[in-house]
Amino acid sequence: MKLVIAGDHASPALKRALVHHLRGRGHQVEDLGTDGESSVDYPDYAALACRAVLDGQAERAVLICGTGIGIGIAANKIPGIRCGIAHSVDTGRLAWEHNRAQVLAIGARVLDSRTATAVVDAWLDAKADEGPRHQNRIAKIAALENPACSTASKPC
Ligand code: RB5
């Protein structure tokens, strides 16, 4: 699979380990930075990686910050992106199975590299649940990008 990976200054060591692991599994992985310990802003890296997915340069993106939360929130602001914030093998798997999250955010300060690797593998190996309830919910998530739906008093 074609992947991009990006993160803030909390990410470089974990990002390098993941790039090595994922390439070893045969994935094509582009590392979009950051590479150093100097403080950077995670929304910038969320935008960079999500843009690559939306432009079709990559099928999926892995995002890393200290907790996975900030970069995940930022990614979910970008129309068309569903970003799962995962901290276990189960949440990684379900982010694809139920939510078809094409972006996964993880926390370098809350997961060791072995767990983070297992979480990302579970997400990449999962099979989407084609059940109509999930399709319907994903369509409703997309509808919320329309202000007429997100501000409506009843579900669109
Ligand atoms: C940066 O210090 C830290 O706030 C960031 O990596 C992340 O954890 C935010 O959610």
Image (cartoon, helix red, strand yellow):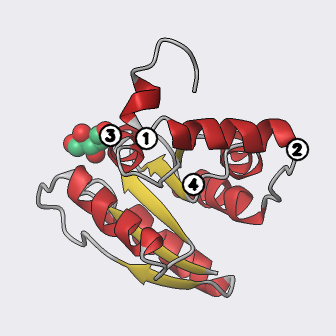
Task: Tell me which amino acid carries mark 2.
Answer: Gly
Ligand 1 is found in the corner quadrant, namely top left
Q: Return the residue at label 3.
A: 70
Would you say residue 88 is visible in this rendering? no
Task: Work out whether mark 2 precedes mark 4 in sequence or the reverse, and give the earlier one.
Answer: 4
Marks 4 and 2: in contact by CB < 8 Å? no
Task: Work out whether mark 3 precedes mark 2 in sequence or the reverse, and give the earlier one.
Answer: 3
Cα separation between marks 4 and 3: 17 Å
Task: Tell me which amino acid carries mark 1.
Answer: Glu
Cα separation between marks 1 and 3: 20 Å
Image quadrant occupied by the N terminus: bottom right
**Above or below 101: residue 52:** below
Task: Tell me which amino acid carries mark 4.
Answer: Ala
Marks 3 and 1: in contact by CB < 8 Å? no
Of the residues tagged 4 and 1, which is closer to the observer? 1
Say if disc 3 is inside 8 Å of ligand 1: yes
Is residue 41 left or right of 133 when viewed as pictured? Answer: left
Outermost residue, right side: 131
Q: Nearer the viewer, residue 10 or 33?
A: 33
Would you say residue 36 is visible in this rendering? yes
Q: Return the residue at label 2.
A: 131
**Above or below 153: residue 142:** below
What secondary structure is marked by label 4?
helix
Q: Residue at x 77, y 64 (%)?
A: 125
What secondary structure is marked by label 1?
loop
Q: Residue at x 42, y 58 (%)?
A: 63
Say if disc 1 is inside 8 Å of ligand 1: no
**Above or below 14: residue 28:** below
* Mark 2 neighbour density, 10 Å: few (under 14) some (14–19) many (20 or more): few
Marks 2 and 1: in contact by CB < 8 Å? no
Is residue 103 left or right of 89 when viewed as pictured? Answer: left
Cα separation between marks 3 and 2: 30 Å
